[in-house]
Amino acid sequence: MSDQMYNEIVMDHFQNPRNMGRIEDAEMLIQVGDPGCGDSVLIFMKIDNDVLVDVKYKIYGCGAAIATSSMGSVMAKGKTLDELLEFRAEDISKALGGLPPEKEHCSNLIASALHAGVIEYRANREDPDKEPLPEREESSLLDRSLLES
Ligand code: FES
């Protein structure tokens, strides 16, 4: 698929992605991958009083994955954790003015990561003995190249 198939909003978020990067003191760090294409996103979530006050990400993915992660991060910031669980991949592609049908699945990456982050965050609060974030950063579950990029 050539980039000409993307509309102007998608191209803008692809070429000027918002919120890309990392948050050093994030409450939640979680990586989600798409086994179908091998793309993945690592998100950093700053949570205060059950609100996502900041979110950043590192991504290894296609143009649509970058654009949807950018738009998804913009839309997610300021939402409550309950609202994030209602947040759907379709909301992101709609906000981008639509994606080519074969690229619709790319918006699942950031939406799934946000959902997983909320679920994991809540599980951690229920089990405070779980490994703290620094140890988890060393986990083989994480793609080191994403963390170091
Ligand atoms: S092709 Fe993998 S997320 Fe777009």
Image: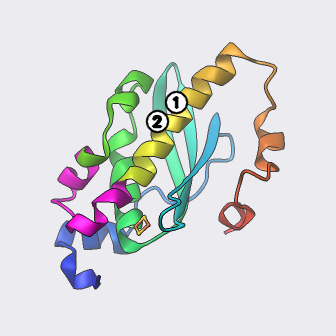
Camera-side residue of 57 and 93: 93
Q: Which residue is mark 2?
A: 115
**Secondary structure type for disc 1:** helix
**Secondary structure type for disc 2:** helix
Is residue 34 shown above or below 1?
A: above
Question: What is the x, y in percent for residue 13?
Answer: 32, 66
Question: What is the x, y in percent for residue 80?
Answer: 40, 25
Find the residue positioned furthest to the top. Answer: 126
Q: Residue at x 81, y 31 (%)?
A: 131
Using the rendered view, name the quadrant where residue 87 is placed.
top left
Using the rendered view, name the quadrant where residue 22 is placed.
bottom right
Whether residue 96 is in magenta: the answer is yes
Q: Which residues are magenta?
A: 91-107
Q: In screen coordinates, is 141 left or right of 9?
A: right
Q: Which residue is mark 1?
A: 118
Whole-angstrom CA distance, mark 1 to mark 2, is: 5 Å
Is residue 6 shown above or below 88?
A: below
Question: What is the x, y in percent for residue 102?
Answer: 27, 68
For the N terminus, the image quarter is bottom left
Question: What is the x, y in percent for residue 138?
Answer: 82, 50
For the C terminus, the image quarter is bottom right
